[in-house]
Amino acid sequence: MEPGACRSRLPSGNASPWLSQQGQGASRKENAMRGRRPRGPEIVDELPGGEQERDRLKAILKTLTGQLRITEAAQKLNLTPQRVHMLRELVLQAGLEALAPQPLGRPPKAAAGSEQEQLNALQQENERLRRELAASKLREEVALVLPNRPRRDEKKS
């Protein structure tokens, strides 16, 4: 064996599967993805939203995949290239925020308002209940003072 030559660990006569695929014309890249072909920016057409928003998102996605240049997208959308760059960054930032980990389970019920609003609502309810209690005590005193008076639902005999 010559110096610098590589020794094969395969027994003689046994070729590696990768080498046999190369000989048949199949490349590794072709075997890397199986199943359906991924859909590109056309998937945006199925999303809810306005036509202008969908067109903008499709153009931005095409710029990210290299199908469309920034200047071409700007011309297509009647925007400046700077605005297209800004929209790209906004889309990417929104995507990152949407993919951030979320706590597991159902989110807790949202508070009705701030603590101050809750405190004000409780104070108002407390005042209402105090007035109702005072009125109830007054009705009880009146009922004790005038015991022989018929009630509304009783008939006079």
Image: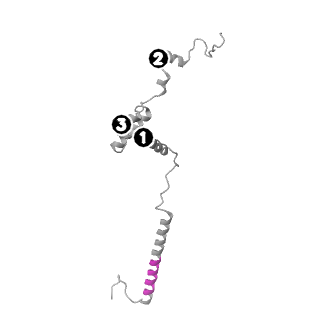
Q: Are marks 3 and 2 in contact (CB under 8 Å)?
A: no
73 versus 11 height, above or below = below
Number of other residues with Cα within 10 Å of mark 3, as a class: few under 14, some 14 to 19, many 20 or more: few
Quadrant in the picture for the N terminus: top right
| Residue type marked 1 | Gln
Identify the magenta region.
130-143
Helix, strand or loop for disc 3: helix
| Real-space CA distance between mark 1 and mark 3, rounded to the nearest whole angstrom | 12 Å
- Nearest the viewer among 40 and 139 is 40
Residue 134: x, y in percent? 46, 81
Tell me which residue sits at (44%, 40%) in the image.
85
Q: Is residue 46 visible?
A: no
Of pointers 1 and 3, the one earlier in the residue sequence: 3
| Real-space CA distance between mark 2 and mark 1, rounded to the nearest whole angstrom | 45 Å
| Residue type marked 2 | Gly
Q: Which residue is mark 1?
A: 82
| Real-space CA distance between mark 3 and mark 2, rounded to the nearest whole angstrom | 42 Å
Mark 3 or 2, closer to the camera: 3
The answer to whether residue 139 is magenta is: yes
Number of other residues with Cα within 10 Å of mark 2, as a class: few under 14, some 14 to 19, many 20 or more: few
Colouring rule applied to residues: one colour
Q: Which residue is mark 3?
A: 75
Q: Which residue is mark 2?
A: 25
- Nearest the viewer among 70 and 93 is 70
Q: Quadrant of residue 87?
A: top left
Tell me which residue sits at (47%, 17%) in the image.
25
Give the main secondary structure, helix, strand or loop, of the magenta stretch: helix
| Residue type marked 3 | Gln
Of pointers 2 and 1, the one earlier in the residue sequence: 2
Mark 2 or 1, closer to the camera: 1
